[in-house]
Image: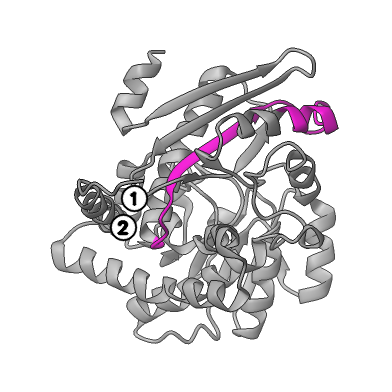
Amino acid sequence: MDIFELMKKDGHEQIIFNFDKETGMKAIIAIHDSTLGQTFGGVRMINYTSIEDALRDAMRLAKAMTYKCAAADEDKGGSKAVIWGDPEKDKNEAYLRAFGRFIEMLKGRIVTGVDLNLDLTDGSIIGRETQYILARPKEEGSSGSSGATTALGIYIGLKACAKFLWGDENLRGKTIAVQGLGAVGEPLLEYLKEGGLEVIGTDFNENTLQRLQAKYGFKTVSPEAIYEVQCDIFCPCAVGSILNDKTIPKLKCKLVAGCANNQLEDEERHSRMLHERGILYAPDFIINAGGVIQAIDELQGYNPERVRMKTERIYGRLLRIFEMAKKEGILPLEAANHYAESRIHRIHKMKRLYVPK
């Protein structure tokens, strides 16, 4: 594995390997592009099978964060941190604080927030060692979990998709298959109920699935069966890379739109596979930007009304991207990439102007 070739391929600026011999904490921080400013990206903890898997996950997600921040009109670049360890066995106070110290060493080059397998309590512990972590518990003066804001963005995005696809943003009566009922999937259920959608849900956590099914009264299927559900919308809200050669042929929907990051195992091939099957794909980094918008807003003093206003712009942004794709004869993902890249290029040109410190 040639790390420099990997960095060259997607334009990464910096890869930092971190190891604390006392706690055994191993982490990789990937910084993709800082053209727009200080980089932002969450930290996740996974017991990866290899260092290559950990590295590729960090690099892929860092690039996605560059595009997400750019498309969301935020003046932030993209980065990502991954902790390589078993969340059930390895995670403890000293372990998390060691990671926090590594973030602090970068002196603000990256600002982070908790992601997969890490919660607000973990974020609070990391925050004892670094000021550069967002979306901590509300009692610490932070904005708390960003799941509800992400869910709001998903629901607003679903309306935009419906407007483009069916000519009417009203979702009442549509059937949606929701894969994953965690931090985003759970609050999304409330919006779907209000919107009058028929929900078919699944989650690997059987207790979570039963609790939410009792509360919202939706139909449930096994995690393996969710891909073959007859529905209007398939909504992935769990892990990434779930749209691939095996799963795409099973889909029985007209729209894929959800909050999971990096839903496509291979962006080019699998976005085209969806298109060829007549399935509209809502680019994940466009529709799921609500959480990032909330976290970044903390840097200027968290304002819920401002966050909601900026999250609601996902509606128009998606419609512009779909119209661009239709007009230019390209895929929605290609249009979304062009949308983000054009902003980065414009700002890069502007930065040639020297401003004295």
Which element carries disc 2, helix, strand or loop?
Answer: helix
Disc ID at residue 336:
2
The stretch of residues the image draws in magenta is: 72-98
Q: Estimate the x, y position of residue 314 in percent, counting from the top left.
A: 43, 71
The residue lying at 78 percent from left, 43 percent from top is 122
Disc ID at residue 271:
1
Which element carries disc 1, helix, strand or loop?
Answer: helix
Between tags 1 and 2, which lies in front?
Answer: 2
Task: Name the amino acid type tagged 1.
Answer: Ser
Of 270 and 11, the residue lying toward us: 11
Quarter of the image that includes the N terminus: top left
- Farthest residue toward the left? 328
Q: Quadrant of residue 149?
A: bottom right
The residue lying at 81 percent from left, 52 percent from top is 206
Residue 234 sits inside the magenta stretch: no
Q: Is residue 184 left or right of residue 121?
A: left
Of 56 and 353, the residue lying toward us: 353
The residue lying at 53 percent from left, 70 percent from top is 153
Q: Quadrant of residue 282?
A: bottom left
Q: Give whichever of discs 1 and 2 has the lower sequence position.
A: 1
Of 316 and 102, the residue lying toward us: 102
